Amino acid sequence: MHSLEERFRKVKAEIEEVCEKCGRDSNEIRIVAVSKSQPLSLIEEAISVGIKVFGENRVQEAEKKIAELRCRVEWHLVGHLQSNKAKKAVRLFDVVHSVDSVKIAGILDRVCKEESRSELPVFIQVNLSGEATKSGVSKKELKDLIRFLAQCDRLKLVGLMTIPPFFEDVERVRPFFRELRVLRDKFLPNGWLSMGMSHDFHVAIEEGATHVRIGTRIFGERR
Ligand SMILES: *Cc1c(COP(=O)(O)O)cnc(C)c1O
């Protein structure tokens, strides 16, 4: 039907439109193109239309793609990280959006030292709905993890991330985005906000998102 280029243009146009409406500068918004389960050919097509930042949720899948891809782009890990994959994650990813425990933070920091990586930018994933199926720290645990990250030499806390519950009606998602922004304002005043996916990025931007993680609206349905 529509090409990837058309879909990407449409997404960008919608981002411009929302930004205009709520008085934000669209240059503040980073699009992380979530390419999980999509073939390498589509990632190459995405690169050819100017996409430079990709998100993957599984280390193994990303490893294969990154190895096969010739050109250098930015890779963001957006899915839960298991400790036995930390070493690979440090080697493969530019940014991790899903730090969700003191344990994984400690392992990542140690691995960075072992791998002589001087800095790894990370977001803390916050679970605001309490859904057991979603990872992320609770609001209560957030402060402790922030404090812990402050002592990590190699990890640089850049912001907060959340995955709200799915509601057809995006207005029901808004309170979650707003809550993450309030937490950011309180604990990490200059931090970024990784929030908003294909069906709710408009609302996320209205609520302050700096990184929107968009999969299907760019790549089409997952394979
Ligand atoms: C899959 C995924 C996305 C993208 O989802 P779409 O609805 O396809 O845009 C964003 N963030 C995370 C963490 C994901 O796992």
Image (cartoon, helix red, strand yellow):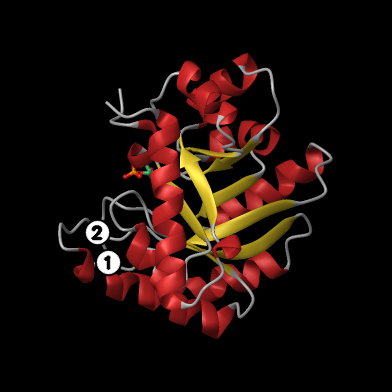
Determine if residue 31 is in view. Answer: yes
Say which element carries label 1: loop
Residue at left offset 63%, top offset 47%: 95
Residue 122 lies in what quarter of the image? Answer: bottom right
Q: Residue 155: horizontal and vertical position, in percent? A: 71, 56
Residue 206 lies in what quarter of the image? Answer: bottom left
Of labels 2 and 1, the one closer to you: 2
Determine if residue 140 is in view. Answer: no
Q: Is residue 117 left or right of residue 195?
A: right
Q: Residue 198: horizontal and vertical position, in percent? A: 33, 48
> Is label 2 in contact with label 1 (beta carbons under 8 Å)?
yes
Q: Is residue 148 left or right of residue 126?
A: right
Question: Which circle marks residue 129 in the picture?
Answer: 1
The CA distance from mark 2 to mark 1 is 7 Å
Mark 1: few, some, or many residues within 10 Å (few <14, many ≥20)?
some
Q: Which residue is mark 2?
A: 165
Residue 176 lies in what quarter of the image? Answer: bottom left
Q: Farthest left residue?
A: 168
Residue at left offset 26%, top offset 55%: 132
What residue type is disc 1 on?
Answer: Ser
